[in-house]
Amino acid sequence: MYHMPLEIKRHILGYCNISDIAMLAQACMHLNLIARDYVQHRLCLMTFSFFDNVDTLSTILRSCDAVVSGSCALHLLLPANDTAWFPSNLDIYVSCRFMTCITVLLEREGYQIVRHHFTEASPYVSSSIHSVISFSNKHRLIDVVISNTAAAVSPIFEFHSTTVMNFFSSDSIFCAYPTLTLHLMSLVNAEPIYFGPSEFKAMVALQKYAARGWQLVVCQDVHGSTGVCRSMPRSIADLSCLWINIANVKRVAVTPADVFERLGIINLIWLLGGYVCGAWDPFMRGQSFVIEDKSLDLLGGGFIGSEEA
């Protein structure tokens, strides 16, 4: 493989998912270079679909503490050669405090606002969404999902299924359920189906991914192979999640300090909605909440070392 043309190397890696590529990257220095080239190649192809400059997307994500989720993030996780569909639009998630910043940056790239719709009228069934701003350059569409929490990623964990609980930032790739997602399996999050403002659209989304090959599985049927249970709260810092550093294509275990460095929050915890695993009667509402940095609260006094304490 070392002496093959670059195009052939990329084609071979096109049959690997992101976890396989990360394992390959740790085998030796030469394979690490091949893996890094391939991941950057896929990110470049995605960026060029929406921007003229290869660095534009990563610059926007870094400047606004934003992430990309939806079909673009999912496509990056899967083997390119075995994935028959390609994302038609870009979904960027950002906290409300960066709404003005990202608007300015996208307008500089030739995009204009074509619609600004708020949660009540939105097809997105999530309580963490403030609004969705749609941008267009007459050729491509970018949806900017504005979170009403300190975390840009909050809405991602309130959607219809585990299929879309993934994102990438300027420096990291994240998958909440890699043992399911990378094998085209998914658990349903019943919260938006039963309690969302548009359960019909949630069902349509489930059908879309089923048509793309996803299999909805029963939690008990995959306990042994995944170690994941829908009835247990999850955290973006737990070991069941997949975090990959884009720079060196290395899988890493993250701590709350790492999460703060990457996302500006300390942690995010979520629970899928639905019937309790192994029972028929108890039903859980889906939940997610953000653990924020409250260090500025210390400036008000009353802490050890302050003049008032």
Image (cartoon, helix red, strand yellow):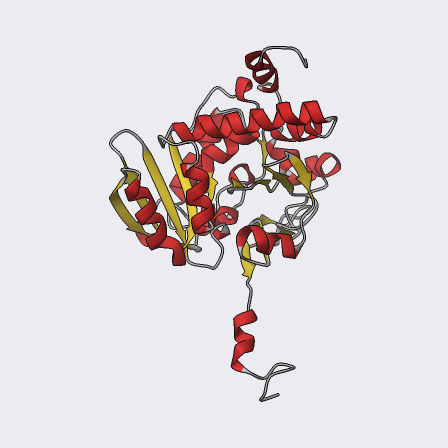
The structure residue drawn at horizontal position 56% and vertical position 76%, both measured from the top left corner, is 298
Count the marks. 0
The structure residue drawn at horizontal position 45% and vertical position 22%, both measured from the top left corner, is 85
In the image shown, does 244 or 182 lie closer to the viewer? 244
The structure residue drawn at horizontal position 54% and vertical position 28%, both measured from the top left corner, is 214
Above or below 28: residue 290: below
Residue furthest to the bottom in view is 308
Could you tell me residue 178's position as x and y percent?
Answer: 63, 36
Could you tell me residue 104's position as x and y percent?
Answer: 31, 48
* Quadrant of the rendered image containing residue 142: top left
* Quadrant of the rendered image containing residue 288: bottom right
In the image shown, does 267 or 11 lie closer to the viewer? 11
Above or below 42: residue 287: below
Q: Is residue 53 visible?
A: yes
Q: Quadrant of the N terminus?
A: top right
Q: Is residue 217 visible?
A: no
The structure residue drawn at horizontal position 57% and vertical position 49%, both measured from the top left corner, is 272
Residue 143 appears left or right of 307: left
Residue 124 appears left or right of 268: left
Could you tell me residue 208's position as x and y percent?
Answer: 44, 30
Above or below 147: residue 41: above
In the image shown, does 204 or 49 lie closer to the viewer? 49
Could you tell me residue 74's position as x and y percent?
Answer: 51, 33
In the image shown, does 62 or 268 lie closer to the viewer? 62
